Amino acid sequence: MGKQRVRALLGSRRQREGFSLIEVTVLSLLLLVAIGGLSGAVLSSLRLSRTTEESTIADEATRALAARMQNEPFRELFRRYNSDPNDQLGLAPPIPGPAFDVTGLKPRSDDPDGRVGRIVFPALDLPGGGQALREDVVDERLGMLAGEGRDLNGNANGAPPPYTDDVTNDYRLLPVRLIVEWTGAGGDRSYELDLVLVAP
């Protein structure tokens, strides 16, 4: 009987020293949950980092374009960058037009021209084709209010609004919106820069 008792004591001690299959399974599940949470946090951090990088790329590209526009002949700006190809006849190349690319950004799948950047002026499409730069286009962000417009050619001489001229050929202020729209790490994104270029 003494030997059997010793064996029983040794057996129970061995059971207490090791892990049961249930304990190992529970520990494995807890470890998998922890690893899953950690990898989710790492992926989320990487996505946020890429989203921030894309926004910086869009900001730098629009600011570089704005600086380039300020160094071009002011009287040609509307003709060089609007959407009417007939306006660009007779201008020295290169003629940029209203769309631009941004290296490092992917165009949205529904983008009609496959380019991420657009340049928008307060202009109206004319019935026979072409565009007219107008003082009475409503765009509050560009300082062009409904019923008031904005004096873009400086001919109001202090007269109150409304301003309603077609200033395609005699503007002194040129409001413009630079838009970048892309598909990136955070899905569909956009960035806009509004500015007013002034005649020298």
Image: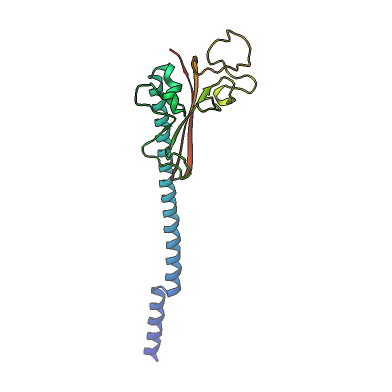
Q: State the residue in front, 43 or 140.
A: 140
- Going by the image, does 173 lie left or right of 14? right
Residue at screen point 40% across, 85% down = 8
Residue 158: x and y in percent read: 59, 8
Quarter of the image with the C terminus is top left
How many numbered marks have been drawn onto this rendered protein structure? Answer: 0
Q: State the residue in front, 11 or 61.
A: 61
Q: State the residue in front, 28 or 96.
A: 96
- Going by the image, does 145 lie left or right of 37? right
Residue at screen point 65% across, 21% down = 147
Residue at screen point 48% across, 34% down = 191
Outermost residue to the top: 157
Residue 130: x and y in percent read: 50, 26
Quadrant assignment, res 56 = top left
Residue at screen point 57% across, 7% down = 157
Residue 31: x and y in percent read: 42, 62
Quadrant assignment, res 1 = bottom left
Q: Give the answer, above or below, for where 117 lies relative to 86.
A: below
Residue 171: x and y in percent read: 50, 15
